[in-house]
Image: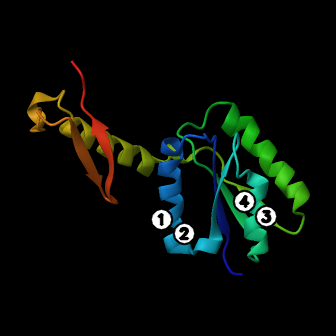
Amino acid sequence: MTGSALVLIAHGSPDPDWRRPLEQLEARLAAERGADAVALAYLAHEPRLADAVALLHEAGHRKIVVVSALLSPGGRHVKHDIPEAVEAARARFVDVEITLVPGALGDDDEVIAALAAATLRLLAYSSADPGSGANASSPASTFSGPAGPRSTLPRTHR
């Protein structure tokens, strides 16, 4: 295999609505890099980092880059839990070069800019913003971003 495979790692939740944005990110990356070169892992739920590394290892990858799919580079997960999980995976998969990208995805300037732009679009769609042109009689607005319609936004209650 050429190039590095990618693991996105986040806290995790059993709630499918919580997982949906990360699964969409994984799908976009897999469309660009190949489905067998991208995996998603969670700290608190399945699949774990070791599961993701095993999947990529079975696909023939021997270089794997781990990116913390969290908003903040601070906190226990980025500073302790994820590095510990990476060390455990390195010990288990001695023939795989596993690199942990420092920090968190959310600390990237482009991610911050995208979040700001999305926040402003959501504000414009909110019925709480009288200047937005949103239909106040509608029970909800549909948000459509670069990936197309993604979710229904609840109307802001006054």
Dot 3: element: helix
In which quarter of the view is residue 6 placed?
Answer: bottom right
Residue with the mark numbered 4: 52
Q: Position of residue 129 (x, y in %)?
A: 16, 29
Q: Which residue is mark 2?
A: 30
Residue 113 in the figure: left or right of residue 157: right
Q: Quadrant of residue 33?
A: bottom right
Q: What amino acid is at disc 1? A: Arg
Q: How many marks?
A: 4
Which residue carries the number 1 mark?
28
Residues at discs 4 and 3 in contact (Cβ within 8 Å): yes
Of 77 and 139, nearer the camera is 139
Q: Residue furthest bottom?
A: 1
Q: Is residue 95 left or right of residue 61?
A: right
Asked if labels 1 and 2 touch by Cβ distance under 8 angstroms, the answer is yes
User: Which residue position is annotated with label 3?
Assistant: 54
- Check disc 1 and report its element: helix, strand or loop: helix
Q: Residue at x 23, y 35 (%)?
A: 123
> Between disc 1 and disc 3, whose residue precedes?
1
10 Å crowding of disc 1: few (<14), some (14-19), many (20+): some
Q: Mark 4 belongs to which amino acid? A: Ala
